[in-house]
Amino acid sequence: MSDKIVVGLSGGVDSSVTAHLLKQQGFDVHGVFMQNWEDDNSDEYCSIKEDSMDAIAVADLLGIDIELVNFAKEYKDRVFSYFLAEYSAGRTPNPDILCNSEIKFKCFLDYAIELGGAKMATGHYCGNRVRADGRTELIRAADQSKDQTYFLYRLSQAQVSQAVFPLGGLQKSEVRRIAEEIGLPNAKKKDSTGICFIGERPFRDFLNRYLPKVPGKMVTPDGKVMGEHMGLMYYTLGQRSGLGIGGDKAGSGEPWFVGGKDIPRNELIVVQGHDHPLLLKSTLLALDCSWISGDLPAEGRYTAKTRYRQQDAACTLRHVDGGVELVFDEPQWAMTPGQSMVLYQGDVCLGGGIIQ
């Protein structure tokens, strides 16, 4: 079997240290920089040129070959079109999750195989291991604050079994230390927090380029008009900032939150108080599910996340037609349609689905 591993070099510190660690382990490492966005990549928000130069500089320092490939068409067809369709429907999608399953672990994986790679590697904070029955599990990273299994729950057996995750057992601080020790030019480069391959940009302005604004009423659950929204696509359940409503407008000092959307009436429902009943639910329905093992988990007790930055919540899973229902031990805050529910059993990420 080939000892060639193809690494996705993004120009960031994580993928750079990934390539270094694999080379240290004796693998024949080949780097690939993916360009997946072209619409406005010369502006201040999407630093394709800077990132590609950083990736090339890292490859030169490590003494590995690197290629630049363009998956912009695939990204637009498979990820961005879905992103726009979901926002048009009033939901809040997570494009990074689809980007991982469709681009990084499909287009890139296929390309890595064409290059003769036995495996592909990325700088994700997670791990994988083979079970006794031969199936591969996706497991959480040692650095719980950086764990990225939430974003990888849609990976298939073929994808997760052909991937290598060298950072799974490291803390982020160790990765930074290694980068500085070996003199990587991007050792202190800040982590990207923008939309996958699109970058960090004013979100409303960006959406407005592709979707028309449809303003409407901002109302309380009992129908009192509190103002006008700019378009339902600009708001998400639980959102507090940007509503333009002061607490004193209704005689209460409590802040206002987005409590829901009435799509047919084009109305944004707003509520006062972080713990308003519209924001707290104990049950969710998830459809369009994807399970890493290939099998639907048995009914029973698990933990789940309904957003990336949250602690696991204990729940009971039940099978329903076309998906699963989760009943949480404690009410969960702002479970948002279009976002993902990700299911865990201990340190194993089982998969998940789209919140309805």
Image (cartoon, rainbow, N blue to C red):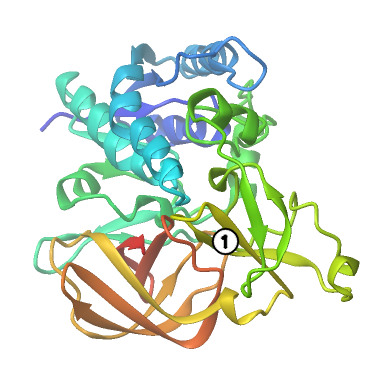
Residue 68 quadrant: top left
The residue carrying pointer 1 sits among few (fewer than 14), some (14 to 19) or many (20 or more) residues within 10 Å by Cα, namely many
The kind of residue on which mark 1 rests is: Leu
Front-lying residue, 12 or 208: 208
Front-lying residue, 277 or 212: 212
- Asked whether residue 166 appears in the rendered view, the answer is no
Compared with residue 237, is residue 203 higher up or lower down, i.e. above or below? Answer: above
The residue positioned 39% from the left and 65% from the top of the image is 341
Q: Is residue 248 left or right of residue 161?
A: right
Compared with residue 101, is residue 43 higher up or lower down, i.e. above or below? Answer: above
The residue positioned 24% from the left and 83% from the top of the image is 318
Q: Is residue 119 left or right of residue 83?
A: left
Quadrant location of the C terminus in the rendered image = bottom left
Residue 181 is situated, as x and y percent measured from the top left of the image, at 64, 33
Q: Is residue 116 left or right of residue 40?
A: left
Give the residue at mark 1: 237
- Asked whether residue 74 appears in the rendered view, the answer is yes
Q: Is residue 334 left or right of residue 251?
A: left
Residue 96 is situated, as x and y percent measured from the top left of the image, at 43, 42
The residue positioned 34% from the left and 14% from the top of the image is 70
Residue 277 is situated, as x and y percent measured from the top left of the image, at 60, 82
Quadrant location of the N terminus in the rendered image = top left
Front-lying residue, 271 or 70: 271
> Residue lying farthest bottom?
329
Residue 294 is situated, as x and y percent measured from the top left of the image, at 13, 61
Compared with residue 235, is residue 95 higher up or lower down, i.e. above or below? Answer: above
The residue positioned 41% from the left and 33% from the top of the image is 24
Front-lying residue, 129 or 2: 129
SS at mark 1 in the image: loop
